[in-house]
Image (cartoon, rainbow, N blue to C red):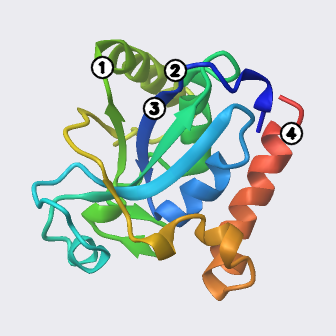
Amino acid sequence: MNPANTNAPLELATVGGGCFWCTEAVFQMLTGVKSVTSGYAGGQTENPTYEQVCSGTTGHAEVIQVAFDPTVISYEKILEVFWEAHDPTTLNRQGHDTGTQYRSMILYHDAAQKEIAEKSKATAQKHFPDPIVTEIVALKKFYAGEGYHQSYYRSNPNQGYCRVVIRPKIEKFEKKFQGK
């Protein structure tokens, strides 16, 4: 993280790319990202719990909300990393995690983000042989997840899921984006 611009106003990006532990771990590594909060969005249930979201009945997906310094990292770059951090061509699934709560989505905060997201999706499609199924929808409400979900990989790097699922994503990310 870059502490040089501590007074710059932060912007928010909200995305879902499967398990929020996985996406959170990748986005926490980006220079210019000030915080990443795992949570829920895109559904109709107010103040959902993890158990409710996992049931698939709330309409919510596991998402992350990224607070970033736009003088250090752009929204476009956030979305570039988003496309690389998961498979946006699988409907309601990432790896062994299945259900609508794991769907790929970009939840835009304003019209400018919507336009950037749509352009980014069109550009990303050129790199995937299968159609991208990522939803691009307005963020209505973001609900922060329970405390034990926050910074999960950092707090539990040797837990089984972290070693088998998240660590390979981190290694792929480091290889692709190191020095960029």
Residue at image coords 64%, 58%:
25
For the residues bearing labels 3 and 4, Cβ distance under 8 angstroms: no
> Does residue 61 appear in the picture of this structure?
yes
* Label pair 4/2, CB-CB below 8 angstroms: no
Q: Quadrant of the C terminus?
A: top right
Kindly identify which numbered label has been placed on residue 9.
Answer: none
> Picture coordinates of residue 27 (x, y %)?
63, 46
Q: Nearer the viewer, residue 53 or 120?
A: 53
Residue under the point 64% across and 21% down:
7
**Where is 104 relative to 58, above or below?**
above
Query: Which is nearer the N-term, disc 2 or disc 1?
Result: 1
- Mark 2 vs mark 1, foreground winner is 1
The residue wearing badge 2 is 123
- Across and down, in percent, residue 136 comes to 30, 33
Q: Residue furthest bottom?
A: 160
Residue 102 lies in quadrant: bottom left
Q: Which residue is mark 1?
A: 110
Q: Secondary structure at mark 1?
A: loop
Q: Nearer the viewer, mark 4 or mark 1?
A: 1
Q: CA distance from mark 4 to mark 2?
A: 22 Å
Task: Specify which label sits upstream in the sequence, 3 or 1.
Answer: 3
Amino acid type for the residue under numbered disc 3 = Leu
Q: Which mark is residue 178?
A: 4
Q: Residue at label 3? A: 12
Near-viewer residue (26 or 103)? 26
The type of residue carrying mark 4 is: Gln
Observer-side mark, 4 or 2, equals: 4
Mark 2 neighbour density, 10 Å: few (under 14) some (14–19) many (20 or more): few
N-term mark: 2 or 3: 3
65 relative to 40, above or below: above
Local SS, label 4: loop
Q: Report the amino acid beneath label 2.
A: Thr
